[in-house]
Image (spheres, rainbow, N blue to C red):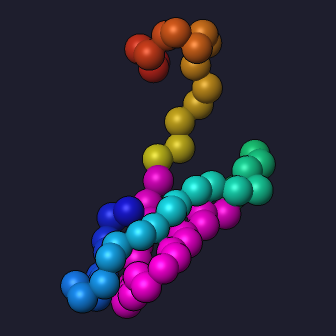
Amino acid sequence: MSLMDLDKETNVRSDVLAKNISTTGFDLIFRTWGDTRVARVRLSWIAMGGLRDDEEWDVP
C-alpha cells in the first residue's frame, strides 16, 4: 500500500492480494473486516519476470 487514510478511533485490519492473474493483467483486492474505517487506499505494484531458478535472487 502506498497510501492509507484510516480512522484513528478504530482498529486497522486489512488484507491485500492479487487475483485473476494473467499475461495481460490482474485484479488487486483490498479487504477489511471488523470496525475498520477506511477513507481511501492506494495500491502500487512492480512487475518482474520469472526467476530462472527458485533459489536465484540475482534478477538480470
Q: For the point 49% across and 10% down, which residue is it?
A: 56
Tell me, yes or no, whether the highlighted magenta stretch contains residue 43.
Answer: yes
49 in relation to 37, above or below: above
59 in relation to 21, above or below: above
Q: For the point 48% across and 80% down, which residue is it?
A: 34
Q: Position of residue 20 (x, y in %)?
A: 76, 56
Q: For the point 75% across and 46% down, which residue is it?
A: 23
Image-based side of 6 in relation to 28, left or right:
left
Q: Dividing the image into 4 quarters, which one contains the N terminus?
A: bottom left
Q: Position of residue 8 (x, y in %)?
A: 22, 85
Q: Position of residue 7 (x, y in %)?
A: 28, 88
Q: How many numbered marks, from 0 up?
A: 0
| Residue 22 visible to an observer of this rendering | yes
Q: Position of residue 28 (x, y in %)?
A: 60, 63
Q: Which residues are magenta?
A: 27-45
Image-based side of 19 in relation to 58, left or right:
right
11 in relation to 9, above or below: above
Q: For the point 67% across and 63% down, which residue is it?
A: 27
Tell me, yes or no, whether the highlighted magenta stretch contains residue 15.
Answer: no
Q: Among all residues in the image, which is located at the extreme left?
A: 8
Image-based side of 54 in relation to 26, left or right:
left
| Residue 24 visible to an observer of this rendering | no
Which quadrant of the view contains residue 2? bottom left
